[in-house]
Amino acid sequence: MASVKSKFIAFDVETTGLSEYADRIVEIGAICFEDRKPMRSFSTLVNPGVRISVEASRINHISNEMLGNAPSENQAYEQFVEFLGDALAGNSILCAHNARFDMGFLKNTLERLGYSGTINYVDTLSLSRRLISDLPNYKQPTVAQYFNIQNNAEHRAYGDAEVCGMMFCKLASLGEQRLALNREERGIPNLTDVEKEIGAWIQKTIVDNGGDLSWFALTKSKSGYVSARYLYSFLRFKVLRKGPFLIVKDSANLPQELVTASCTASEGGDAFVRVFFKTPSDLSPLSDCIVSEYRDCRLEALEYIEENSRHRRKARLTMESYAGVTFSDAEVEDLLQSAIERHRKELEDERAEQREAEKKARRREARERRKREAINGAAESKPARNNEGHKRPIAMMDDDENEISRFESVSAAAKEVGVSTKSIRDAAKGIQQHAGGYRWKYLDE
């Protein structure tokens, strides 16, 4: 429902009869919706140069007298084509109830007047049948009543177009709810905020370079890769803890300032590279590469889709199975602003962490400095030890404390007597009475 979020045109026509070839349009009503709100409108009677039948006039209340002063087909369609704008190039979709009828008349008239183009449209009749059950019928008044939408000008083009547009918005919301439930039931992961921001940047880059979003969507695999698709995938990215990366062809002319890494086999192997970035705007140097991949993919997709109606139906079902997402213009703007604010906060957090780390380093350095100063101060205040302190003279005595021998140090005594220095010291300190069967006493005491 991407086009519903961005822009679409609801339209309706009143005709002289039911044949798109034999009959003519006598009234056009159209309303351009942006972000699901009516923004511009177009309404005109058309003098087709043929008379309206009594049966048709009875339904739409348009008389031949009313058409007498109406603009001619050439005048009316010149203005209407201008109102349609990029919708004639397939860049905005049209919606109508029982669209085959309205589109048949519109297509035939445009071709007859020499206009050409590609129009993508949605039928709210078919859509309501898919999304709403248990209605007695699916005529526009019945579906409108289901959504509590009132039509103050029923069977007139402008009133029917307005109601159709409002119904389309309601059906789109209902479809999105079903889609979300489908995603949950199938275990399809939702996009994270960061992934949405990156996807919004990719979508905006495509639109800014003239691309359309008719078959565009962002999808996410269970392994965490997000694909940008135009029916087929043309770009992938993934968000890791260390940061997001985009997968591009290795043959792409990449600026040297970009940080790259090899791809895994499942990512394409040597034919592709990972391009790491911090914020979506960092990908600006890759805009041309992204747009080129999009255009190649779009060309291939449209060749398949436009080949026949079966391919179109299959493509639509395929896109629905992807359960992809796209963003409205307002959502893109909000997401890109969110990306800027997120990056700003990340930079502020990094600077705050750096300042805190520097504070901790300074505090640690100060503690170590004070510790060194304390050690140095204690060493300076401690009296110098007598070099002879390690060689205290000691005497070996009997139990009556008669001196037997003198030694210049405990070590010398231990070596001479064959007793451990510890035992001699303990005996000299009175911890034990004897060492080697003798008493011991320091001579400097």
Image (spheres, helix red, strand yellow):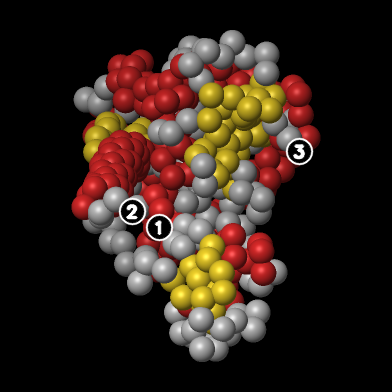
Of 428 and 59, nearer the camera is: 428
Mark 2 vs mark 3, CA separation in Å = 75 Å
Disc 3, SS: helix
Residue of label 2: 385
The residue sitting at 47% across, 57% down in the picture is 391
**Residue 194 in sight here:** yes
The residue sitting at 39% across, 27% down in the picture is 281
- Tell me if residue 291 comes above or below residue 29 in the rendering: above
- What amino acid is labelled 2 in the image? Arg
**Horizontal and vertical percent position of residue 326:** 47, 42
Is there CB contact under 8 Å for labels 1 and 2? yes
**Horizontal and vertical percent position of residue 204:** 41, 29
**Residue 166 in sight here:** no
Of 281 and 187, nearer the camera is: 281
Is there CB contact under 8 Å for labels 1 and 3? no
**Horizontal and vertical percent position of residue 328:** 37, 41
Q: Earlier in the sequence, mark 1 or mark 3?
A: 3
Of 50 and 426, nearer the camera is: 426
231 relative position to 441: left or right:
right
Within-10-Å neighbours for mark 2: few <14, some 14–19, many 20+ = few
Image quarter of residue 40: top left
Residue of label 1: 389
